[in-house]
Amino acid sequence: MKELFGSPGKASGLLLRTGQFFFAGASVGAMASAAGFSISTAFCYLIASMGLQALWSLGLACLDIHALRLKRRLQTPILLSLLAVGDWVTSILSLGAASSSAGVMILFVVDSDLCKRDRKLECNMFGISIALAFISWFLLAISSYVMMWMLASVD
């Protein structure tokens, strides 16, 4: 089986999972701290999706730490298929949440000028949260891609 960047049980995999957790958690924190985020269900969905991604990434980071400490190999076919399915599901949910939130922001800023009219809305925080969500999704997409390649090359 090939050793790829971001493989489970490797330092690069731990780095990817830590980045996913950090950016997803930062996205949740930024959105939840912004006044008026509950005005849009897309923003609430972003919080839920990034929360799920943060939990998934934290769990897999802990698994990577455990494998690195014990020098265990985490590349069994059953585990790889579980990780691949989990990564793809959370990746699709995260991309959907980030994209729908970005669409709502375009509506607020460009189409309706709601951010200019209602000063109580913290539109800058919404934008920061959405950008962090896309970064987190990008890191998860890398992990998903690696898992699919590893699953395809299982002995």
Image (cartoon, rainbow, N blue to C red):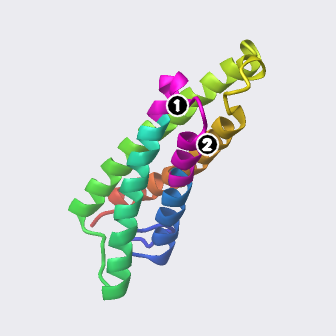
Q: Is residue 98 magenta?
A: no
Furthest residue toward bottom: 70
- Considering the whole magenta stretch, tell me its main secondary structure: helix
Q: Is residue 90 left or right of residue 131?
A: left
Quadrant of the rendering where the N terminus is positioned:
bottom left
Crowd around label 2: few <14 · some 14–19 · many ≥20 (10 Å): many
Q: Residue at x 68, y 33 (%)?
A: 122
* Residue toward you, 3 or 68: 68
For the residues bearing labels 2 and 1, Cβ distance under 8 angstroms: yes
Q: Where 22 sits versus 136, above or below?
A: below
Indicate the amino acid at tag 2: Ser
Residue 96 position in % (x across, y down): 48, 32
Secondary element type, mark 2: helix
Residue 101 position by quadrant = top right
Q: Which mark is residue 43?
A: 1
* Residue toward you, 42 or 12: 42
State the residue position of label 2.
129
Residue 12 position in % (x across, y down): 51, 72
Q: Is residue 37 magenta?
A: yes
Q: Where 19 sits versus 130, above or below?
A: below
Q: Is residue 88 left or right of residue 43?
A: left
- Label 2 to label 1: alpha-carbon separation: 9 Å
Crowd around label 1: few <14 · some 14–19 · many ≥20 (10 Å): many
Q: Residue at x 35, y 56 (%)?
A: 152
Q: Where 123 sits versus 63, above or below?
A: above
Q: Residue at x 66, y 28 (%)?
A: 121
Q: Which residues are magenta?
A: 25-45
Q: Is residue 102 left or right of residue 18?
A: right
On the question of residue 64 being in view, the answer is: yes
